[in-house]
Image (cartoon, grey):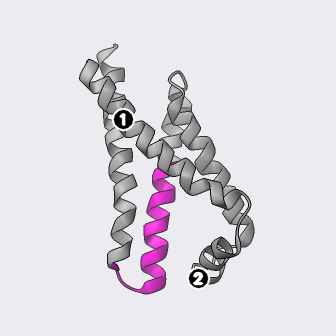
């Protein structure tokens, strides 16, 4: 069980850290953020701040041990965000470009975090 807990915290800190780190610039969207999200991907400008704040709140929720139900929602929201990012990039470019593979690192970290979190939860029952 100790190994599962260690692995859980490693993957969770990396995953939550990535999501928080990726959300911080959008709280006060820079010109580059607006160019990418609005001009390139076509999202409304107000969406940049919304999704950024949601990423930060979700990342913090993952790091608080007793928020089990909220943590489920945070995992779901982050996977929707990452899936939407892949879908948006592929839709705009019309193909799966090599740079799109970078998004799979946080997806893998999130999957591993969720897997070990469930292992820890089931071992406590």
Up/down of 24 relative to 47, above or below: above
At 63% across and 54% down in the image, what residue appears?
Answer: 24
At 48% across and 50% down in the image, what residue appears?
Answer: 18
- Between marks 2 and 1 in the image, the one whose residue lies nearer the viewer: 1
Up/down of 55 relative to 3, above or below: below
What secondary structure is marked by label 1? helix
What secondary structure is marked by label 2? helix
In the image, taking residue 71 as reference, residue 31 lies left or right, namely: right
In the image, taking residue 73 as reference, residue 110 lies left or right, namely: left
Q: CA distance from mark 2 to mark 1?
A: 34 Å
x%, y% of residue 16?
49, 43
Considering depth in this image, is 47 or 13 the residue closer to the camera?
13
x%, y% of residue 107?
37, 53
Res 44 → quadrant:
bottom right
Determine the residue located farthest toward the top in the rendered image. Answer: 125
Please indicate, yes or no, whether residue 87 appears anywhere in the rendered image.
Answer: yes
Which quarter of the image is occupied by the C terminus?
top left
At 52% across and 50% down in the image, what residue appears?
Answer: 19
x%, y% of residue 14?
42, 43
Up/down of 54 relative to 84, above or below: above
Judge the density around disc 2: few (<14), some (14-19), many (≥20) Cα neighbours within 10 Å.
some
Q: Which residue is mark 2?
A: 40
Dot 2 or dot 1: first in sequence order is 1
Q: Which residues are magenta?
A: 78-97
In the image, taking residue 105 as reference, residue 39 lies left or right, namely: right
Which quarter of the image is occupied by the N terminus?
top left
Q: Which residue is mark 1?
A: 10
Up/down of 38 relative to 70, above or below: below
Please indicate, yes or no, whether residue 119 appears anywhere in the rendered image.
Answer: no
């Amino acid at each position: 069980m100790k190994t599962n807990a260690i692995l859980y915290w490693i993957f969770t800190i990396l995953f939550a850290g990535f999501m928080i780190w990726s959300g911080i610039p959008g709280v006060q969207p820079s010109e580059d953020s607006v160019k990418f999200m609005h001009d390139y991907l076509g999202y409304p400008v107000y969406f940049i701040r919304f999704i950024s704040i949601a990423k930060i709140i979700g990342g913090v929720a993952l790091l608080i041990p007793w928020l089990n139900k909220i943590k489920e929602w945070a995992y779901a929201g982050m996977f929707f965000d990452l899936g939407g990012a892949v879908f948006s990039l592929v839709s705009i470019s019309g193909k799966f470009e090599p740079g799109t593979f970078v998004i799979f690192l946080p997806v893998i970290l999130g999957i591993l975090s969720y897997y070990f979190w469930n292992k820890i939860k089931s071992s406590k029952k």
